[in-house]
Image (cartoon, rainbow, N blue to C red):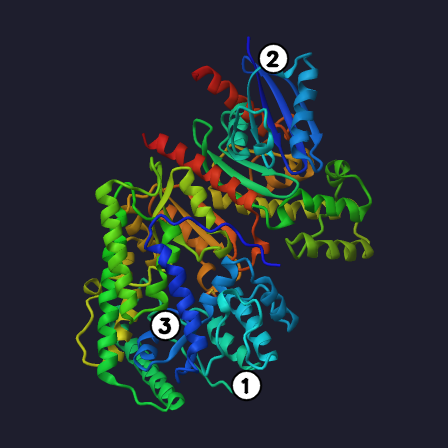
Amino acid sequence: MAFVLGIDVGSSYSKAIVLEEGEIRSYAVIPSGGDYREAGRVAARAALEELNLTFGDIARTVAAGYGGNMIDFADDTSTDISCHAAGVHYLFPSVKTVMDVGAQYSRAIRLDDEGRIANFIMNEKCAGGSGKFLQVAARILGIKVSEIGELSLTAQKAVEFTTGCAVFAESEAVSRISEGASPADILAGIHNAMASKIVTLVIRVGLTPDCAVTGGGAMDIGLVKAIGRELGTSVFVPEEPRITAALGAALMARETLKTS
Amino acid sequence: MAEEKKGRAVATSTAAKIPKFVRGNLSATLKAKEEGKKVAAAFIADGQDEIMRAMDIVPAWGESFSGVCAAKRDAEKYLQKAESDNFSRSLCTYATCNIGFDMMREELGGATPEGAPWGGMGRPDMMLGNGQLLCDPRFKWPQATQHYQQDVPVFVTNMYYPPWDPNADHHEQEAIYVKYATEELRETVKFCEKITGKKMDWDRLAATVELSDKTWDLFIDTYELRKHIPTPMDTGDAMNTMVPLTFNLGTQEAYDFYVDLNAELRQKIADGVGVANPERYRIIWAAGLPSWFALGDFQYFNGKGVVFPVEVTYRGCEKIERLDLPKTNDPLEHIAWRWVRYWTHWYDAAKKRPGSTPKVERIIEYIEDYKCDGAVFHSAFSCRSWHAGIMQQAATLKKVYKDIPILIMEGDIVDISSYNEADTHNRIDAFIETLAAYKKRQG
Ligand code: SF4
């Protein structure tokens, strides 16, 4: 009976997962703030406390993500891209294409049959396909990001944005509000614009069904549906889409333990 | 305040001589006046090198100076200066960095601005622009600079070559393009004669062209030594060792440099010394100018056992024999044929593979010859000319060749604000993991 720990320190959130015999036993998601080292430790501690465990009970730890290299108590590090691949493969073995929509970036990852990366493309220079776009939308409409998904589903006629650029879309959204467009129609339009950016990445990486969406963006049901429409297929979404990289890291820790 | 980055350790000691070359080229522009020589603002790979060398005209390479500013992480002040006069940062940053520097120098009445990297560059007596078929900044940059240096005459050529069209017979078209390019070069000579007040010594030009041909051959022979496993030199070095070919073509120093490099690589091979030990993966640098401020990233690759035995960038020559150049006694016509065939000799191969293009064909040949496992492309946002088609090249490569791992890096040549080291290293790590998975699949 060995516990392993996977940590993913992202630019916005840090996540930690404890696995035992390949089963998820606990996890935690906390805001990263400015101190990645501390954020990783706090997330790990929160996941351990749920099981009344301490760091001493953990056989192996793998850290990933933006601040993964700063986790000094980790035995090993990996990229969050590989970890996403491993995590999604564990949850949905048939998935070959992953769209990870984070706060600052979006990326598409193609997996091989073993759940390893076959190809990946990142887009972190343009906010158009990332969670940033949703934050901008929430701010203009005076709602919470978490309310966007459900509200967008009530749209009657999605607003068509003439731009896929988050910066220009902001002023376009403001003009549409003044023209009387409903918040739901605006959000549905934003989802469509984002979906088309994300699917462009998927095409570049080589669309291979089945597909899954992960990251904070996958918590937005409206965006997930828009991506599905754009792809012309349904997509898998993990129950907690923010923890797939931490899960992958934990699986890697387990793998090394098995082979060492 | 310029941020100095730790210098890149070079794998070959011959490459360590490059800063002397670059400094020498810059200081030659500053000393030219005393020596009674004329200075020409010049652009690389456009067939004008030998004309300048044969007429003792000192080239002032704007691209080189901007690269130095970038490598010293000291370009921002010049970019901002150009921006203050409405030159957008998304224009070629070689151009805007150089224009900013020229603006400052003009404000000082022609004196070199204080703190200019490696002493700066001298004021030109003429500007020889060249679009090189595809680069619009190289048309507009000299013209834009002329706003600040109104007394400096500009002469802009193009050096067209037949555009790629799988259904056209480029062999039929070549002669027309060569005729046009030869006339452009002839006009360049006339322009230079007018500015310098000297006549071209045609025998000297012919000898200079012959020396260039020899340098082209030696360059390729030397670079082909990198096929060896482990490779004795990688792209991190090649971004330095390209200097003599690119900026000093037609000089004995350039030829001698490759004699030394050739000897050193042979010795490394004999001693079994490679860039990375063990060498885990071999990658082609398939396209794109590098981020001059981040050359240390090559070492990051090397540190993980990844080497670049070959690159497309700055391999601006070919074995002369392979180009099968028609005989001519006119050195300008020879330069024109060499230029046109340098591009078109890939066309036949591309025609044989449906859906391929000459650029992709070239990448495939190098992948095969240098036994590469994957490809890295660098898309520098401010150089549209060379980088606009990179995504398509990568996609075509996968389609017509094989689904090899490809990393597309995004950044710039000069503008450091486009760069994030942590993200870049994260991408590189993920790419290496992709390579590992690919090799496993291949068995
Ligand atoms: S080829 Fe690119 S880098 Fe060179 S001058 Fe033209 S735009 Fe600038």
Name the amino acid, label 2. Answer: Asp
Q: Can residue A18 be seen at all in this image of the molecule? A: yes
Q: Mark 1 = which residue? A: B150
Q: Residue at x 31, y 69 (%)?
A: B249
- Return the x and y of residue A73 as percentages of the image width and height: 59, 24
Name the amino acid, label 1. Answer: Gln
Confirm if mark 3 falls within 8 A of ligand 1.
Answer: no
What is the spatial separation of the Cα atoms under label 3 and label 1, in whole angstroms? Answer: 24 Å
Provide the secondary structure element on which disc 2 rests.
helix
Q: Mark 3 = which residue? A: B46
Badge 2: chain ID: A
Question: Can you say whether A103 is above or below B192 in the image?
Answer: above
Side (left or right) of B388 relative to B277? right
What is the spatial separation of the Cα atoms under label 2 and label 3, in whole angstroms? Answer: 67 Å
Question: Can you say whether A16 is above or below B367 in the image?
Answer: above
**Disc number lying in front (2 or 3):** 2
Confirm if mark 1 falls within 8 A of ligand 1.
Answer: no
Provide the secondary structure element on which disc 1 rests.
loop
Q: Residue at x 55, y 57 (%)?
A: B73
The number of discs equals 3
Badge 3: chain ID: B
